[in-house]
Amino acid sequence: MSYQAEYSNAIENPEGFWAEKAADLPWYAPPQQILSTDDNGIYRWFADGEMNTAYMALDHHVESGRGDQDAVIYDSPVSGSKRKLTYRELRDEVAKFAGVLKAQGVTKGDRVVIYMPMVPEALIAMLGVARLGAIHSVVFGGFAPHELAVRIDDAEPKVVVSASCGLEVAKVIEYKPMLDQAIEQSAHKPQACIILQRPEAKAELTEGRDIDWVEAMAQAEPADCVPVKGTDPLYILYTSGTTGKPKGVVRDNGGHAVALKYSMKAIYNMQPGDVFWAASDVGWVVGHSYIVYGPLLAGCTTIVYEGKPVRTPDAGAFWRVVQEYKAKALFAAPTAFRAIKKEDPEASLLANYDISSLQTIFMAGERLDPPTYDWTVGKTGKPVVDHWWQTETGWAICGNLMGIEPKTPKAGSSTLPVPGFNVQILGVDGQELPPGEQGSIALKLPLPPSCLPTIWGDFERFRTGYLSDFPGYYTSGDGGYKDEEGYVFIMGRTDDVINVAGHRLSTGEMEEIVAAHPAVAECAVIGVNDPLKGQAPIGLVLLKDGAEVEESQLQSELVAMVRKEIGPIACFQRAIIVQRLPKTRSGKILRKLLRQIADGQSYTVPSTIDDPASLSEIESIMDSHGLVQRNG
Ligand SMILES: CCC(=O)SCCNC(=O)CCNC(=O)[C@H](O)C(C)(C)COP(=O)(O)OP(=O)(O)OC[C@H]1O[C@@H](n2cnc3c(N)ncnc32)[C@H](O)[C@@H]1OP(=O)(O)O
């Protein structure tokens, strides 16, 4: 089948196309209703199908003879441990953990928050929740207590699952005190917390609320899979929006399973039994889709890696893991390869390893810049596939379909739309733009299976945030263009969301934190180009009249505040004092112009500017602080 035939089939006959893909999964009752609309008027997939995602990902494989195959390989250079679980072992652990949750009263539709490091128990917890037809919400371990509290209040979990600690390079991060602080801050109180004690730190358990993972598992009765409808939620995953309140992206069980199973073959060219490695974290959508559900639904072996691309112990870490487990596909964010390139520019450590099992390197999570693309292709000799997707979709919108018809790649492009996604570049008037012209990237409805049907508890936010800019389309929030051959080039966000080391963050939220400093009258936080992390946030701060504070003192206080409220992953390290911020006559800060100045790009002064002199003024302050990049 050619790419074109597959793509046209999915767009022209979506119900037939996805009915066929759904038939590739073991439903309890196969869906008769393939595409329908819900009470909000949103397209939904497989509404009347009956299924259980954990059954499809585990029990089904054991029943069909895959029980002795490795399901999960855990490799943790930071703790010095390795462990393998077969499909049978994983199924049994998951059934027992589902029993632990059931004993706490967790039933279908209940929420369970999971705040865990990269250990197999994180997957066991996720799949255990899915087994009961409950809804998990995994919170990335790099988030601070405040972020966890916001998510606890929104998801209102019956139970929280966590660990005593996470392990970063040469440091132990105690999770349990952060969980305690979060629960103290949140209005909603979970009735129980299940805590995995790790040898590197022992957590104090709160009497009457906290339960020891090992003790609970020892007493647990395995629980059976609970059937759910295709449209019942499997998980909520929070992602940054333009304000401080994250958006709870809701993922259906049915569409998710169908899309991920399809993607494992079509995009990643994986067969049952192959080893797939997504070097991400279960706290991100890449981790949900391609550390946990995609590989397991497809009968592959997945690698859970608790380490970094560098410093664990060196920049050969990725090549070592590929060699040791014969990984066929490696999926990571471009920032990981920039980190390797920085420490080992000639990739000389690669010569120590045999990476012949590796067929393709996949990258996503942020824009893949052409120098990183060229370096990775040049040094590894492997095809590199840049693919573009979002937490909201759960899988790739554009990519190079390695299992259908690999296309000639173009550096800077995520190749072509994936079957099911009708990708269009729209101008401000909603009209499709010709090749080469940059505009908003919009997806014509219906979206294919797995894409979000709502924001948890806030349909209106979903409607206004995604569906109201261009009627009949989903607005991605990313801008870009297509070339004459239809290749899609993603150029970056059109809103105030930034991407730091593959972590999607809100500058609006950082502004709220910075503005809370007693000396700050007003501020703008912008994302500027960063050679390692892709983007980095910087704060431009206007002091209150009479406020007396040294710039360096203010900077360290603001850095500490952002770190405390959001977490270390915000990488907020620079803040400078300015005399005024460039604004329109109606008082809107010209953030895009500030970004262009910092990135050394040419810019057009808008006719609506209040005072054009404010631009040269701010440029000279930013320049004097080394915050203006000189290109070329
Ligand atoms: C396609 C849809 C999507 O976009 S899904 C999102 C995909 N994104 C990803 O997979 C993320 C890719 N990025 C990474 O894996 C890391 O950033 C890599 C490249 C490995 C670099 O790691 P690192 O050197 O730690 O830098 P960083 O910027 O990530 O971390 C900054 C500070 O945060 C800390 N941190 C990080 N992770 C955790 C964690 N799980 N728990 C606790 N702390 C964490 C780091 O230690 C670092 O702290 P510090 O500032 O040094 O004190």
Image: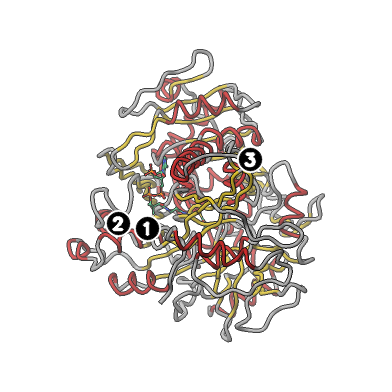
Q: Where residue 345 appears, x then y in whole percent?
A: 26, 66
Q: Nearer the viewer, residue 517 or 560?
A: 517
Instruction: From the image, state whether disc 2 or disc 1 is nearer to you.
Output: 1
Where in the figure is residue 385, as x and y percent of width and height? 43, 70
The residue at 62%/55% (across/down) is 580
Which is more N-terminal, label 1 or label 2? 2
Crowding near pointer 2: few (<14 within 10 Å), some, many (20+)?
many
Classify mark 2 as within 8 Å of ligand 1 or not, answering yes or no.
no
SS of the residue under disc 2? helix
Q: Position of residue 393 (x, y in %)?
A: 61, 58
- Label 1 neighbourhood size at 10 Å, few (<14), some (14-19), many (20+)? many
Residue depicted at x 68% and y 60%: 583
Q: Which residue is denoted by mark 3 in the rendering?
A: 227
Extreme-left residue of the structure:
352
**Earlier-in-chain disc, 2 versus 3:** 3
Label 2 to label 3: alpha-carbon separation = 39 Å
Which amino acid type corresponds to the residue marked 3 in the rendered image? Pro
Mark 3 and mark 1 lie on one chain; the one further toward the N terminus is 3
Q: Amino acid at mark 2?
A: Phe
Residue highlighted by disc 2: 318
Whether the residues at callouts 2 and 1 have beta carbons within 8 Å, the answer is yes
Residue 586: give its label.
none
In what element is the residue under mark 1? helix
Residues at marks 3 and 1, CA–CA distance in whole angstroms: 39 Å
Q: Quadrant of the C terminus?
A: bottom left
> Mark 1 CB in 8 Å range of ligand 1?
yes
When asked about the image quadrant of residue 618, the answer is: bottom right
Disc 1 marks which residue?
Answer: 336
In front here: 314 or 237?
314
